[in-house]
Image (cartoon, rainbow, N blue to C red):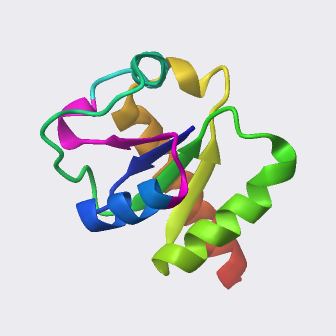
Amino acid sequence: MLLLIGFPEDEVKRLKEKYADIIPIAADMEDRVLEEIIKEGKSSENYQILGDQRMVIMHDVPKENLSKLISKIRKEIGKHIIFATSTPTSLKWKISDLMEELLEEDRYFREQRAK
């Protein structure tokens, strides 16, 4: 399953054509817990982009498929995307808290690469 954050509707539609198990995270879902969204298996009816940064949370994707999947999505979208896999800890977090953590990690790794 792929959970998409910060993707415009046209990109969500393009990815849904290639990957069946996608949940776009809408702005009205930022206070929801990741695990609850996964269990429900659906997005909000009123899709509005959440945040400025595109993020993909991969849930239950086999490890051997991760790098291939990341490459394909990067090639399809062509923008900076933060990728993460769900963990037992992140499943308990609100989307807004998870986004904040992922943005912080992304900033840190970009700074390290720039050194």
Name the residue located 59 percent from the left edge and 55 percent from the top edge. 83
Q: How many marks?
A: 0
In the image: residue 28, left or right of residue 10: left
In which quadrant is the C terminus drawn?
A: bottom right
Nearer to me, 57 or 99:
57
User: Is 39 part of what is drawn in magenta?
Assistant: no
In the image: residue 104, left or right of residue 32: right
- Above or below — where is 34 with respect to 53? above
Name the residue located 68 percent from the left edge and 70 percent from the top edge. 71
In the image: residue 96, left or right of residue 89: left
Name the residue located 62 percent from the left edge and 22 percent from the top edge. 89
Nearer to me, 15 or 77:
15
In which quadrant is the N terminus drawn?
A: top right
Q: Position of residue 16 (x, y in %)?
A: 43, 54
User: Is 19 part of what is drawn in magenta?
Assistant: yes
Nearer to me, 90 or 63:
63
Magenta range is 18-30
Q: Position of residue 8 (x, y in %)?
A: 27, 63
Q: Position of residue 113 (x, y in %)?
A: 70, 78
Q: Position of residue 2 (x, y in %)?
A: 53, 44
